[in-house]
Image (cartoon, helix red, strand yellow):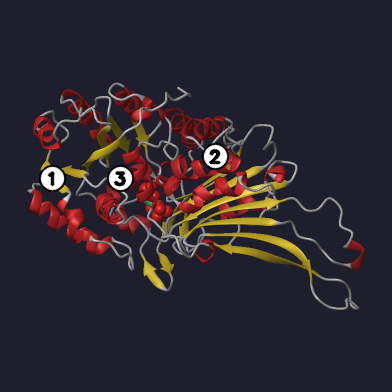
Amino acid sequence: MTATAAAPHFTANKLLLFGATGDLAQRMLLPSLCALDSDGLLPDDIRIICTARSEYDDDGFREFARDALTRFLPAGRAVKIEPFLEKLSYQALDASTPEGFDVLAKKVGGVDTGDNRGLSIFLSTAPFLFEPTIAGLQANGLASGNVRIGLEKPLGTDLATSCQINDAVAAAFPEHRIFRIDHYLGKETVQNLLALRFANILFEPLWNAAHIDHVQITVAETVGLEGRVGFYDGAGALRDMVQNHMLQLLALVAMEPPTSFDATPIRDEKVKVLRSLRRVARDETVRGQYRAGAIAGKAVPGYDEELGKDSDTETFVAIKAHVDNWRWKGVPFYLRTGKRMPERTTEIIVKFRDVPFSIFADRGARTQPNTLVIGIQPKENIRLSLMAKVPGLDREGLRLRSVPLDITMPDAFAGPERRIAYERLLLDLVEGDQTLFVRRDEVEAQWDWIDAIRATWDEHDISPKTYTAGSYGPSAAIALAERDGVTWHE
Ligand code: BG6
């Protein structure tokens, strides 16, 4: 399905949160909801019904939530916790069986209020629970016309399982009421990419193969397994980071101008990019797995030690990708992501081509190609390197130097609050704006491309090369770029 039917508008005054005691809920969802509520952005009468397997009563869960908020609300964020806690209630439920959904439905109360209000549901649970949860919701009247559903990743482990989940959800909810989360789309600088590209005249005429030499996307993390052993070892970096976050970043960089800043046109353009991705050749990927090393002077164990056994799961992946369309013909997109890298950085580098002819060459001065760096985290900045003449009388030759035009977002916009990505996404889920959510055809195009990479790895027995924690991955990843004369931006 490419087109999305216009969604009937309603603002949810009830939010039903599955997986409410999980790690994501504690770190992100509860703090985001609390911050939104405290800023008066959620409906005054919103009720947030939380559910998970653990046995709590309402007050017990509020204590649990208070503790999570104390630990995970961003430092310096002045929020009112108590009024938020009063909006929470809790119902224990084992979502793997149909029993108990009727009790949950009673706790939620009616959803067909006929007053333009409704229910938003957020599934932050293991994917194996999606199908029984949706069946339980549907059987108990919690999937009707004014109910929308948000799904947290992972949406499957390959195209087949993703289709299975999508089919199960589609059996109860039409696409315009399904909100697939990719939290990278909630990040401010990721959205700013669209403003940079489409609210400025400067870049768009140059944004193509004639003027861009290559693009790099790096998502480097310092963390390791973080206690997610079971999940991560079955997933690996390709499925955990590239299938979703990195391909979304790539799609936003490479997409054609959408007709408007709305869900359907934006998602139409992204899916065209995802479908234009060329199958990756055997020598265009590198898998890695970290071994013991040090990060910021602190010793950290290897992946195998954290896991307690040998494993063939990659914690690093580098890919040379190609978008086969008119705009990008011949422009490689180098992607890399890994755990236990020297620093936490997410950035997009657009390397322009050099000037076609340098009038300064006879004077011994060299030009360097312009580079646009879009820093997504931890620094939110946009830096454009430009060539400038080094001041002086030039008696010993003219010198040119690359100087940065640097826009640090928090400085440029000192007033507005920096928000957690989930604040934006949860508010959009409550209000029903799908622009920053992933449509079914996008997810499936992403998996299609990822599955082909995994098939190549299997076919050629490509297992992860080791790298020392605190480095930027195996040396083969450096070679992947350098054999094209490209250096990874660091
Ligand atoms: C998640 C992955 O989707 O994104 C994690 O499952 C990863 O492995 C995380 O650590 C990174 O998110 P962020 O916002 O910290 O870059």
Residue 318 is tagged as: none
Quadrant position of residue 298: bottom left
Front disc: 3 or 1: 1
Can you say whether 437 is above or below 470 in the image? above
Q: Is mark 3 within 8 Å of ligand 1?
A: yes
Q: Which residue is drawn at 50% across and 53% down?
A: 189
| Amino acid type at mark 3 | Phe
Quarter of the rendering occupied by the C terminus: bottom right
Front disc: 2 or 1: 1
Q: Is mark 1 on a helix, strand or loop?
A: strand
Q: Which residue is drawn at 46% across and 28% down?
A: 441
Q: Which of marks 3 and 1 is nearer the N terminus?
A: 1
Tell me the residue that label 2 is attached to. Answer: 251
Q: Which of marks 2 and 3 is nearer the N terminus?
A: 3
Residue nearest the observer in this picture, 339 or 22: 22
Question: From mark 3 to mark 1, how far is it between C-alphas?
Answer: 26 Å
Residue nearest the observer in this picture, 486 or 356: 356
Can you say whether 8 is above or below 415 in the image? above
| Amino acid type at mark 1 | Tyr
Tell me the residue that label 3 is attached to. Answer: 231
Image coords of residue 215 (percent x, y): 63, 48
Image coords of residue 442 (percent x, y): 47, 32
Q: In this view, does 145 lie to the left or right of 237?
A: left
Quarter of the rendering occupied by the N terminus: top left
Q: Which residue is drawn at 13% across and 52% down?
A: 61
Question: From mark 2 to mark 3, how far is it between C-alphas?
Answer: 26 Å
Tell me the residue that label 1 is attached to. Answer: 90
Q: Earlier in the sequence, mark 2 or mark 1?
A: 1
